[in-house]
Image: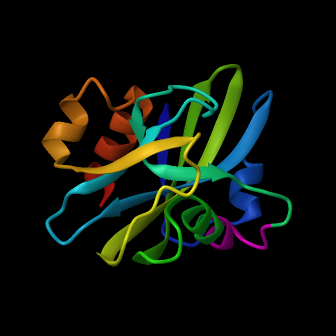
Amino acid sequence: MNFYKLNHEATIEDINKFQYNNQKIGVIIHIENNEGKILLQQRGVKSRDENGLFEDVGGKFDDTDATFKSAIIRELKEEIGSDAIIDISNSIGIYHCYKNDINWIFIIYLGKYIQGKIKIMEPEKCLGYQFFTYEDAITSELVTESCKFLIKSIKENA
């Protein structure tokens, strides 16, 4: 697992620097509330992997997405609905991890939960949402190791 800090909005040129076998592109948003607690999603039975464990919100970049930012906006609506107001930053980094024979390259965004209802829009892929303190997130056995790495990387590079 690697985290690469960005000082600009991620572009295709940034992604083209990575040349891994079986590479896929995704987007992740690390959401915190006003108290600094981190919103994590519990993965459901039809999730690709790590069922029952908690991770940041995100998903695959689709060919129909105009930009990485539009992809994370789409993922937020698909996963938590449109009632919650989340302030979204520009991308802050690129995260590489290897899971289940896939080299994932994720564009990372920060989100600030402002208000509104967080809904479970995909009940077979998501069991629910929970806010964690930083300490609880990085020590919990219910949070994936890749999510813990990302949380620590974001804190170190913020």
- Residue for point 59% across, 51% down: 122
Q: Residue at x 23, y 35 (%)?
A: 138
Q: Position of residue 155 (x, y in %)?
A: 26, 52
Magenta span includes 68 = yes
Q: How many marks?
A: 0
Image position of 132 with respect to 54: above or below: below
- Viewer can see residue 156: yes
Residue at point 58%, 26% (across, down): 49
Q: Residue 62 at x, y = what percent?
A: 79, 57
Residue at 50% across, 43% down: 126
Image quarter in which the C terminus is found: bottom left
121 vs 146, left or right, is: right
- In the displayed orientation, state which residue is furthest to the top: 101
Magenta residues, start to end: 65-71
Q: Residue furthest right?
A: 63
Q: What percent of the width, then of the height, locates residue 76?
A: 55, 65
| Viewer-closest of 152 and 18 | 152
Q: Is residue 23 above or below residue 109?
A: above
Instruction: Answer with the quarter of the image where residue 153 lies.
Output: top left
Magenta-colored stretch includes residue 156: no
Report whether 4 appears left or right of 124. left
Q: Position of residue 16 (x, y in %)?
A: 77, 51
Q: Decide if residue 19 is in sight here.
A: no
